[in-house]
Image (spheres, helix red, strand yellow):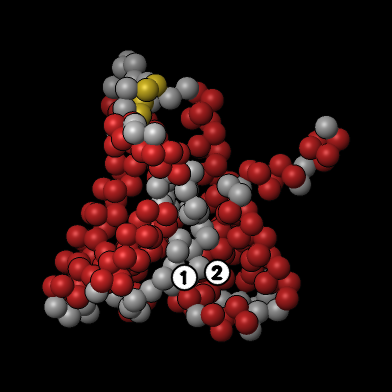
Amino acid sequence: MGDRAGRYRGDAALGVNFALYFYAARGRTGHALGNREFLTYLSIVAGSTVLLTAILYASDAGGSPLTAFREASFQSASLATGTAFSTAAWSSWGPFAQIFLMLLMAIGPCAGSTGGGLKVIRAVLLARHAWQEVFRILHPQAVTPLKLGNRVIPERMRGAFLGFFFVYVALLIFGTLLVALHGVPVGAAFGSVFACLNITGTALGPAGDPAFYAALPGSAKALLTFFMLLGRLELFTVLVLLTPAFWRG
């Protein structure tokens, strides 16, 4: 239990924006504790732990309440941060828990951390933008600037996170098609691209088995390696390198 608790703390710590550690080291803990993304990240991990604990205990998949809590907390932190350690076969936890954990992997940790995925800040802004559009339909005359805390999000930044999300979804779809061209079943193709693009190291279904990747042809492995690079470098960094304008400049 102690070893797993230590790994849990380590996994959760890796999902924090490293700039906040700098502020904390300089004695500016208030800045770190007041960071909206950091607080949202902690809420997501804590909320996921509570929800998955209840699911595991209710389904008898987690055994005792303590065992269910231990497995749920560890997998929530591990998959949200992309460290991909496993203490249980979460692929057998039932459809809801599996999809929920995949959502955690897609959201990822904080920006400026070691993990992949969309990042918490983008997920928060996407959710607020979606709600803002619904609010505007209900109240077309209302002036509703997009905010994060007390900060108004400029249009340029709004375009940036919407563009990132569009490219992220497009790469998932396009990558799945390319991997499927190698004779891989669609579900396994999606799982492998999802795992590589989010830098999770594990996935649902066949793509969660290391032997799956060993059996892939070299071209499929090269493609998935490229998607890992895209996920690691925040998509646009790599895509810009592929444009002729970059090399001409």
Question: Residue 35 or 138: which is nearer the viewer?
Answer: 35
Q: CA distance from mark 1 to mark 2?
A: 7 Å
* Quadrant occupied by the N terminus: bottom left
Q: Which residue is mark 2?
A: 192
Question: Residue 29 or 88: which is nearer the viewer?
Answer: 29
Q: Earlier in the sequence, mark 1 or mark 2?
A: 2
Label 1, residues with CA under 10 Å away: few <14, some 14-19, many ≥20: many
Question: Residue 31 or 217: which is nearer the viewer?
Answer: 31
| Occupied quadrant, residue 87 | bottom left
Question: Picture coordinates of residue 227 (x, y %)?
Answer: 63, 59
Question: Picture coordinates of residue 9 (x, y %)?
Answer: 32, 59
* Disc 2 residue type (three-letter): Ser
* Disc 1 residue type (three-letter): Ala
Q: Is residue 20 above or below residue 183?
A: above
Residue depicted at 26% across the width and 48% down the height: 43
Q: Is residue 34 left or right of residue 19?
A: left
Residue 58 appears in the picture as rendered: no
Q: Which dot marks residue 203?
A: 1
